[in-house]
Image (cartoon, coloured by chain):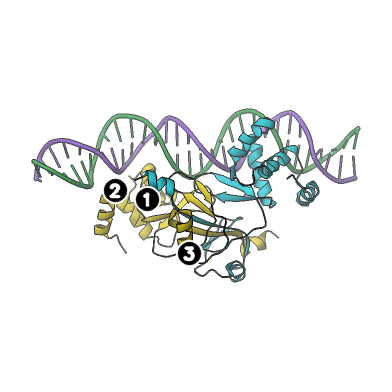
Chain colours: A cyan, B yellow, C purple, D green
Amino acid sequence: MSIDMADLRRRFREKQYKVTPQRQKILQTFIDNQEKHLSAEDVYSLLQVDSPDIGLATVYRSLEMLEKLGFLHRIEFGDGKSRYELATGDSSHAHHHLICLSCGAVLEFGDDLMETLESFVSRTADFEITDHQVKFYGYCSECRKRDE
Amino acid sequence: MSIDMADLRRRFREKQYKVTPQRQKILQTFIDNQEKHLSAEDVYSLLQVDSPDIGLATVYRSLEMLEKLGFLHRIEFGDGKSRYELATGDSSHAHHHLICLSCGAVLEFGDDLMETLESFVSRTADFEITDHQVKFYGYCSECRKRDE
DNA sequence: TGGTTTAGCGAGAATATATATCTTTTATGA
DNA sequence: TCATAAAAGATATATATTCTCGCTAAACCA
């Protein structure tokens, strides 16, 4: 799979962003690694092979930009580094904290049911949802086995 | 509310941890700030008033330890710093990524329903769940108003 | 209670991730 | 093709967290 250049140019132009070879290569890296969750460093390393001239700062800037445009999703695994994956049209659900991407405000949402939460939350809290994350923390079988 | 010392001593002793005044004060800080999500720096600042002799490294070490013992929960808001809150007996739900706290392995769980996911996931993926997080990302009404 | 053991402490250095700055380069639109 | 404003590369800086080391004190036992 490769990039739909017409769509990309359109979405870039809307925000006055330039279509540079660096940005195309960074986005292509995600297309070539669909199932992975790549950190900035990961992307930078992968690019060293074919494009050793792309700087780490450019990678960081591009990731931020591509997320803003909706090409990528940012994921936090709590290991201190942000990871990104291709944004697709899937879905999950749920609730707990409402985190504003713009000002960082954290709004509580003291409910506990699951149903049609996304639209419900959106209406009730007057919060425009662009993404959600649902994560479980715990111990995998390997670690449980190893640690006695 | 204050600390149940008998329970605390029991849970500490199980893992050979010592009950130090620093750790008690750090835990008390969370009890005194129930509704907040405190970062290491936040805790450190709050402690400056009454216990200016507690070092930042001690705060970090204690937070990690208290989380391991189940007194605290770690939360990631994606702003680069970990936050903690008192672990209570509440609940939410959901799924997406399984993140091993021990080795950092990220296991996919390609389902999309919600039902009794926690026990289902636990059985199916052989993963011992100790915590889960459900978050929505988006824009609050304030920011939407301000940014045009 | 006093002594021994070992975990924990404070301070500061070290590391890691991410962002900012500055100069040069280049995509874009007339 | 040219002007211009965005973006690139290189590097410095900021921020969060972990590590190291010598000293202190909690825990346990006699």
Q: Which mark is residue B15?
A: 2
Q: Amino acid at mark 1?
A: Lys
The CA span between labels 3 and 1 is 20 Å
Q: Indicate the secondary structure of the residue bearing disc 1.
A: helix
Can residue A12 be seen in this snapshot? Answer: yes
Are discs 3 and 2 located on one and the same chain? yes
Q: Is residue D21 above or below residue B99?
A: above
The CA span between labels 1 and 2 is 10 Å
What chain letter is assigned to the residue under label 2? B
Identify the residue shown where x is 65% and y is 39%: A59
Q: Amino acid at mark 3?
A: Ser
Where the N terminus of chain A falls, by quadrant?
A: top right
Q: Earlier in the sequence, mark 3 or mark 2?
A: 2
Q: Residues within 10 Å of mark 1 (few under 14, many from 20)?
A: few
What chain letter is assigned to the residue under label 3? B
Q: Amino acid at mark 2?
A: Lys
Give percent across and percent down for residue D22: 29, 30
> In the shown orientation, is residue A37 left or right of residue B52?
right
Q: Nearer the viewer, residue B113 or A20?
A: B113
Q: Residues within 10 Å of mark 2 (few under 14, many from 20)?
A: few
> In the shown orientation, is residue B40 left or right of residue D13?
left
Look at mark 1 in the image and give the residue it sits on: B68
Q: Quadrant of residue B89?
A: bottom left
What chain letter is assigned to the residue under label 1? B
Look at mark 3 in the image and give the residue it sits on: B92
Give percent across and percent down for residue B60: 39, 45
Q: Do residues under tags 1 and 2 come within 8 Å of each other at their CB atoms?
A: yes
